[in-house]
Image (tube, helix red, strand yellow):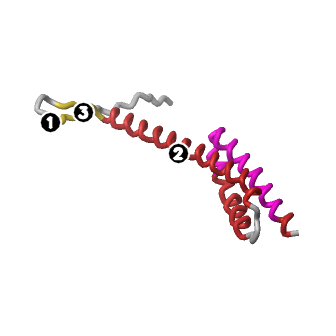
Amino acid sequence: MADQVAQDLIDELDTLLDRERQALIDGDLELLGRMLTHKQGLIENINAMDALERERLTDIHNKVTRNQALLNSAMEGIRAVANRMADLRRVRQGLETYDQSGRKTRFETQNLSSVEKRA
């Protein structure tokens, strides 16, 4: 009976990891957040099992590793976008140049609203 419970947990985690992979590929960060608690609970329950053969967890381990690589790539992409947006904000605020002696000079830009409101 305990063997069947363990297999059910492994199968459920396997399915969840496939869904997590698809969410990572789709960029569905909201779904990833919703699945996290369920995934953690499944992993905790599997870890609490006394005797599980290593071979039964090989596929799960491979999927976790694969998803972690996808998640790392997604985080790098998000960081790159955040850095690029920060650079664009700095450019909009002004221009920085250096003179012949290496001193930095900043030329501020004016924020002119280009939106006209009409009644």
9 w.r.t. 82: above or below = below
Secondary structure beneath label 3: strand
**Nearest to the observer: residue 63 or residue 34:** 63
What is the CA distance from the residue labelled 2 to the residue labelled 3? 30 Å
Q: Earlier in the sequence, mark 2 or mark 1?
A: 2
- Measuring 50% from the left and 42% from the top, which residue is drawn there? 76
Q: Is residue 31 left or right of residue 69?
A: right
Secondary structure beneath label 2: helix
> In the rendering, at what x and y percent does residue 16 appear?
74, 51
Q: In the drawing, what numbered circle is on residue 75? A: 2
Nearest to viewer (mark 2 / mark 3) = 2
Q: In the drawing, what numbered circle is on residue 103? A: 1
Magenta span of residues: 6-32
- Measuring 42% from the left and 36% from the top, which residue is drawn there? 84
Secondary structure beneath label 1: loop
Q: Earlier in the sequence, mark 1 or mark 3?
A: 3
- Measuring 38% from the left and 34% from the top, which residue is drawn there? 88
Q: Residue furthest left?
A: 101
Q: Identity of the amino acid at label 1?
A: Arg
Question: Which of the 4 quarters of the picture holds residue 42?
Answer: bottom right
Q: Residues within 10 Å of mark 2 (few under 14, many from 20)?
A: few
Pointer 3 residue: 96
Residue 31 belongs to magenta span: yes
**Nearest to the observer: residue 45 or residue 110:** 45
Question: Which of the 4 quarters of the picture holds residue 47?
Answer: bottom right
37 w.r.t. 80: above or below = below
Q: In the drawing, what numbered circle is on residue 116? A: none
What is the CA distance from the residue labelled 1 to the residue labelled 3? 10 Å
